[in-house]
Image (cartoon, rainbow, N blue to C red):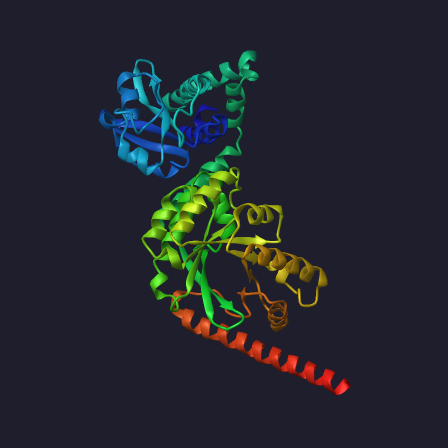
Amino acid sequence: MAGEIDPLQLMQRVADEALELIEAADGVLVGVLIDSETLAHVCGAGHVASHVGKTLAVADSLSGAAIRTATTLVTDDTETDERVNRTATRAYHVRSSVCVPLKRGDGLLGVLSVSSKRPAAFSTNDVELLGELAGFISAAVGAASDFTAATARLLADPRTAEAPAGRFIAGVLDPDGAHAVTAHADTERILQAREFSVAFQPILELRRGRVFAVEALARFDDGRAPDVVIDGAHEVGLGVELELALAQTALAYLAQLPHDAALAINAGPDALSSGGIAQLIEAADPARVIIELTEHVGVDDYPHMIDTLRAHRRTGVRLAIDDAGAGFASLMHILKLAPDFIKLDRELTDGFDVDPVRRSLATMLMRFAAETGAQIVAEGVETAGELATLRTLGVDYAQGFFLARPGAVAGLRRASAQGTSRVRCSHSDWTAARSANRLTRTVAQ
């Protein structure tokens, strides 16, 4: 069995499980000493996972102090604690942390560091549990034979079998945990090698037939669906980093969009709360940015999200709720967050020119939008019939393959011209049909 154990994989599982076990934790890092003065972070989870692979001076951090003193150190507020590396804690929004040294005999191997975005987040029980987990990591890193013995003792002890640490050990030994390690490495590769791009799809104003906005859509080099990649990144604690990288790429093209067109970028609740996206938008032109709230991560704290969005909106940013009508979550977002735009999910617009049920639900959302001052954007428009029905119902904006397919920014002018032409043709057909109906009624009278 000893030959089959990969200490690095086990440490990553520890990091992932620690994030689940410690309720207050937002991030976990495991660092090992590469020499007497330098610590290298080899595994991580949560909002600090992007720090994996980076080094830290032992003399210049709370983690280093824990190693130098061979004691567990806790900081309740990084803003007032002189022992911390304040540049690093501010960059990763760390306000409190626990650093537990990893030991082997009389020597030191590294440190287990668990952090929170809130001050004074960790209890005495949290610190005790992290001490047990650090002992487990130390055994795994130190030697496979020692690790096997430690595991046997923990699993054989009836007291630990029912305790949180006992349940943790069982989770760590689950072979499925290896999937998380692979997924983490996969996402890190995508981020570091920039194995993604952004496609742009025009959003047309149906009344005047002009390009109102352009949505930035993620594309990944390996061909996987964006939702699959981004959801997977969130599962291993790198979702925010990936969303910010995509937003940064999209915003870099803002100056190349059609004159006065807004740029719609997708962002989940965690990315919005991170502070990173605000910095990116402020460096661009907030008045031309629409944030589309996506559902890669659920909103657990609506009051906090409302405060976050209020700060964005003060700069001129507008909010759109994506996938309206696709489920309960989007409806809750609409009720709680008062968006500027409500985007009808493609499941609603797909064939709704011939489906009265879809039309009824769309009409209900339109009435709600009118009462709250929001505007409707229909997604997934793929036929002339759907476009004509949207116009008849009074929908404000639309996007979809029938109008213009997503593509590189270089082809945006041509795609926009196609969409504008089809909206105006639809308008002409609609006007002609309305005139014909009036003439028929006049003759009948």
Does any portion of residue 296 appear in the rendered image? yes
In this view, which residue lies farthest toward the front? 445
Q: Is residue 311 above or below residue 257?
A: above
Residue sitting at x 38%, y 33%: 43
Which residue occupies the foreground of this view, 191 or 240?
A: 240
The answer to which quarter of the image holds residue 50 is top left
Q: Residue at x 67, y 68 (%)?
A: 353
Q: Position of residue 248 (x, y in %)?
A: 36, 53
- Work out which residue is located at the far bottom of the displayed protein and give it: 443
Image vertical order of residue 158 relative to residue 300, above or below? above
Q: In the rendered image, is residue 347 in sight? A: no
Picture layout, residue 376 above or below residue 242: below
Measured from the top left, where is residue 414 in percent x and y?
43, 74
In the rendered view, would you say 160 is above or below 13? Answer: above
| Residue at (36% x, 36% y) in the render | 93
Q: How many marks?
A: 0
Q: Quadrant of the C terminus?
A: bottom right
